[in-house]
Image (tube, rainbow, N blue to C red):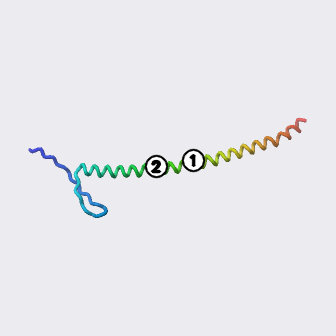
Amino acid sequence: MSDKRCFAMNEIKCPKCGEVFKVDESGMAEIVKQVRDSEFRRALEERENIWKADREKSIALAKVMSCYIVHILSIRKRHQFSEVPNMICKAQ
């Protein structure tokens, strides 16, 4: 028996022009790699956009919370100072 290598040929139809191409294993592997790389980049960009949106929401929430804390502290401070004269009067 002779040593003949059998290369599987795949037929691929172009989605744009409709022409059918024969592609060997290495060509098919390259096409699959390109598709996989493209899908990976798309998924990575999507995750990056989600991360950026979450980051912006977190920053906005932190700003609101810091304003709220400052407001509460100022109310507590005013309340403490308003009680000082009452405490002095009660002590006398």
Q: Give percent across and percent down for residue 89.
A: 89, 39
**Viewer-closest of 66 and 87:** 66
Q: Residue at x 13, y 46 (%)?
A: 4
Q: Residue at x 49, y 50 (%)?
A: 50
Which numbered disc, 2 or 1, marks the residue that appears first in the sequence?
2
Question: Label 1: few (<14), some or many (≥20) within 10 Å?
Answer: few
Residue pointed to by mark 2: 47
Task: Name the disc covering residue 44, or none.
Answer: none
Residue pointed to by mark 1: 58
Q: Secondary structure at mark 2?
A: helix
Q: Residue at x 20, y 51 (%)?
A: 8
Q: Residue 72 sits in which quadrant?
A: top right
**Viewer-closest of 37 and 88:** 37
Q: Is residue 34 left or right of residue 80?
A: left
Mark 2 is on which residue type? Arg
Q: Secondary structure at mark 1?
A: helix
Q: Quadrant of the C terminus?
A: top right
Q: Give percent across and percent down for residue 71.
A: 71, 46
Q: Quadrant of the N terminus?
A: top left
